[in-house]
Image (cartoon, rainbow, N blue to C red):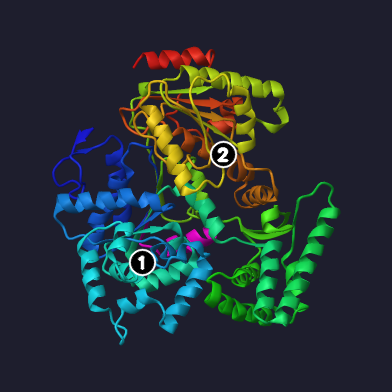
Amino acid sequence: MHANPPNSFPLFPFPQIRDGQRQLMEAVQKTVKNKKILLANAPTGIGKTAGVLAPALEYALENGLTILFLTPRHSQHKIVVDTLREIKKKSGKTIQATDLIGKRWLCNLEAAQDMQQSDFEAHCASIKKEGTCPYHNNTYSKVGALSENALKMLSKLESEIMHAEEAKKACKGLCPADIIFESAKAANVIIADYHHIFHPSVRDVFLAKTGKSLENCIIIVDEAHNAPARIRGLLSAQLSTFQLERAINEAEEFGNKMLADDLEFMLKAISKMCGDKFSSIKYANEAFVKKEEISAVFEKVGGKDIFLSSIEEIAELVREKRKKSFLGGIASFFQSWSGPDIGFARIMRKSDEKRGEFLVSYDCLDPSIVTKPLFEETHSIVLMSGTLSPIEMYEELFGLTSMRAEKLVLTSPFPPENRLCIVVKDVTTKFTKRSEEGLLKIAGNLVKIINRARGNTGVFFPSYSLRDSVFELIERSIEKPALLEYPNMSKEEKQNLYKKFVNAANNFRGAALLGVIGGNFNEGVDFPGKIMNTVVIVGLPLERPDLLTEALISYYDFKFNKGWDYGYSYPAITKAVQTAGRVIRSETDRGIIVFMDERYLWQNYRKVLPPDMDLKISTDIGKEVEEFFKKT
């Protein structure tokens, strides 16, 4: 830690600047002043939020700019709001900030959060137009101006820095979304989700409603390692036979037999196309499909424009009655399907029972389709993460190689002796080497770790099936309660399981949480202090070698000559490192990270690990774990 020299960063809200934090602040200061882009790899403990906000906000206030602080999750807004409150309190400056989450989550109508986004938007517009939304009616006067109560609420939001949930609760009888958006017009900082800026059509609405322009904005992207995949997801679309079947029912129920017949024809044509493709390829569950193969079906039902117009007309009637329409989702898919070929893959898949027999997808492969033009137009950008490694990969994925980008790589500020990083090299989950003997080795090592580690241990696997197979082998041998997470857990179920794990930390014996990398308790959930003293990453969380992965590898090979790295191996290491980062969250935390797979020692994987992660090869894992905790 270093004392904070007077006036060097007047908006920095804390008494001391941490190691590495000063470098980050100086880099941000230079970035916003020179209208550049900064890629910052800043490990946990640097203090990224305050370190970025203090210099960026100082420049924004002096130059009439707005900060757009983007996060991948609602839960990550809290630290930004809390930091801004500290800055305002410490500096005494007038700072207006708006915490913005999805409009659907701000709506006070009971049915809103059960709707799909497209259905909600259509329903919201419809009831406003009809004058049947009580919240909208209370927010505006008959001449369209804000009502007296709405103006009072707006004044409150402009004078206080509030979490979105607090603002929603305070907007009693009013439309929270409209008032929050209204407050954003005067905001110096807007905290928003990725989709507000990275989804092109949502961004257009966002900028229009807030009265902001990109050339007058500083964009801060938090957890930026998540952004490429999230952006690809925002530009992708899917159509299932289940959706088509439900859409046929809607068309029939609302009296449009001709549309129902056209949809029935389309369902049969697409199903036959899928069947023919799969029967011609032995053991195939998926196949690439060309744009014109689906487009040709349109011509047999009167052409795309007429067909989509009919769908939208009935979808509107369905939403008026049910709030949700499968027809609307189908219209959105077909509009996406006519998009470009370069940077996208079109794939047919055999589907699960829930989604029907087949699934057709239009998958985005290239996030720079969005980011390159967006960043070119923006005043300055800071992309930050604790796992933005290798940083050159993200520079290329975001399309920044020919732009004004600077790179900053910081090392962990935590004492190295507080963290033991071990690789168990005699095991692997590599599919071609997977065996009963290999599973027994994994199980044996886990029993030693769990039984000898002090307090709580988190064990994360590449898949639920592997987790379940290993758990059967260790269930009777581990001396701590086992807590298992499952896919599709409700919010309440996750909270209850987390509470059990936290409570177990107060017991010297502790518990073992067995989950999946990328599951409910991986990234985005903190285990501070002694809540998790040991984390084990079993295997390497590589994506399934399916056609989408193949398409990514092929596209990145074509564009960067690094297909295997960018499309397959590097993202897996990023996931593993994110999981490992759960165990050390402050400079006083002590813990063990175990990578249980020989591949972490392979050069093509090891070179992607953080440079300050000093890996030790295990010779006796039980003894090594026991001795580490004896030192505390």
Residue 373 forms part of the magenta stretch: yes
Q: Is residue 397 above or below residue 61?
A: above
Front-lying residue, 436 or 409: 436
Residue displayed at 59% across by 18% down? 444
Q: Is residue 16 above or below residue 360?
A: above
Instruction: Give amino acid for label 2.
Output: Ala
Residue 572's disc is: 2
Along the viewing direction, whichever of 493 and 165 lies nearer the viewer = 493
Q: Give whichever of 567, 619 is nearer the camera.
A: 619
Please state the extent of the stretch shown in magenta in the rendering. Answer: 368-381
- The total of numbered circles placed on residues is 2
Local SS, label 1 = helix
Residue type at numbered disc 1: Glu
> Residue at the location (28% across, 68% down)?
183
Is 539 placed left or right of 523 in the picture? right
Q: Secondary structure at mark 2?
A: helix
The answer to the question of whether label 2 and label 1 lie on touching residues, with beta carbons closer than 8 A, is: no
Residue 25 horizontal/vertical position (percent): 28, 45
Work out whether 123 lies above or below 1. below
Residue 458, how many percent across, how many down? 48, 30
The residue shown at (47%, 32%) is 580
Upstream in the sequence, badge 2 or badge 1? 1
Q: Position of residue 15 (x, y in %)?
A: 17, 39
Is residue 40 visible from the viewing direction of this image?
A: yes
